[in-house]
Amino acid sequence: MNISNPNSFVLIMAGGVGSRFWPKSRNHFPKQFIDILGTGESLLQLTYKRFLKVCPNENILILTNAGYADLVKAQLPAILTDNILLEPSRNNTAPCIAYATYKILQKNPDANIVVAPSDHLILKEDVFIEKINLALDFTADNDALLTLGISPTRPDTGYGYIEYLEDEGIEKEIKKVAAFKEKPVLEKAQEYVNSGNYLWNAGIFIWKAANLQKAFEKYAVEIDALFKSGNAFYNTPAEEQFILDQYPGSPDISIDYAILEKADNIYTIPADIGWSDLGTWASLHAIAQQDEHHNVCNSEHLHLHDTHDCMINLPKGKAAVIRGLDNFIVVDDEQVLLIYPKSAEQEIKGVSKEMVSRFGEQYS
């Protein structure tokens, strides 16, 4: 795949709130804009740089909430203003992907698109780019909707799974998808991992824009009609007003439910790319560099005693003295201090909502 291929596009979805990373991730400055890995770059910036190996800058589009326009422009100054697509409401992934797809089709009927989240970690970038290019080559020549599947390393109950047919691959690495599975209980997740033909669903998709539009025409008629009605406005000064007026009325539905679970031309590529969706503090703890007591800390100004398996995230320059914590999350963002058992972190999203309800929107 030639990086300068004018038909290759990337859509980076950057509109989420990342509520499980509260209080570091907040409505006004969510997870994708944070240097959560301590690299000096945000997750969005790392994702953008990664995809410059797939297509030219002018073919990368950012899908984000209207409230984050300035953050995107500040962090990605090279992105064309017309390539920052602003959602006036949060209506899940199907409408935003349809919007971007129909806009691109007005420019390039042969467009071949990668859709990816902005806030995932990929450690094996060379392998990732190789798999993406394989997928783009395949979808360029086949009426196929393809999802990159992650080879599972454990029976995780936090991810959806993709079941594929081992004997129905069109090519050695490209497998026909049999079914998408919801997040399973642990016993079922163990069955999936043991079977050998299940993958984690990472939400990374590859398809020709024209083929996705055909799928919308067939399986999501309301979404198709709404965004087709904008064909005369895309890539013109009238586009912004059309989206402001019409987008909030689109169905609130994911691309998985709207298209992927209904279509019969779904394929996957199993990939071992060192992937994590960084969905929680514990997932960051699992992949980050740990000290001899298995603590992950972003500060050198710490005095730890009898403290193990903790995730400690402090503001720059802040010192902390901690004794006697085991398997805890400690996050200080200046306005909010969170000290919470790592084993109960699934409760944090609810706790953050309770804080907002009791004490005000400044804590959202």
Image: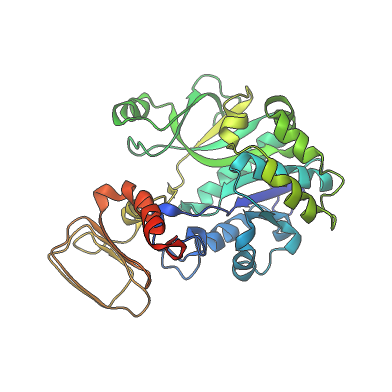
Residue 363 against residue 179 in the figure, above or below: below
Using the image as rendered, state which of residue 36 and residue 69 is in the foreground: 69
Give me the residue at 33% from left, 35% from top: 155
- Residue 146 placement: quadrant: top right
Residue 9 against residue 255 in the figure, above or below: below
Using the image as rendered, state which of residue 88 and residue 43 is in the foreground: 88
- Residue 213 placement: quadrant: top right
* Residue 55 pos. (x, y %): 68, 53
Give me the residue at 59% from left, 44% from top: 132
Colour pattern: rainbow
* Residue 104 pos. (x, y %): 77, 47
Using the image as rendered, state which of residue 229 and residue 5 is in the foreground: 229
* Image mark count: 0
Residue at the limit of the structure toward the right, as seen here:
232
Q: Is residue 286 left or right of residue 99?
A: left
Residue 225 against residue 30 in the figure, above or below: above
Q: Is residue 12 left or right of residue 359?
A: right
* Residue 239 pos. (x, y %): 80, 53
Q: Quadrant of the C terminus?
A: bottom left
Give me the residue at 64% from left, 25% from top: 265
Note whether residue 294 is visible.
Answer: yes
Residue at the limit of the structure toward the top, as seen here:
167
* Residue 93 pos. (x, y %): 60, 42
Residue at the limit of the structure toward the bottom, as seen here:
317
Q: Is residue 72 left or right of residue 112?
A: left
Note whether residue 142 is visible.
Answer: no
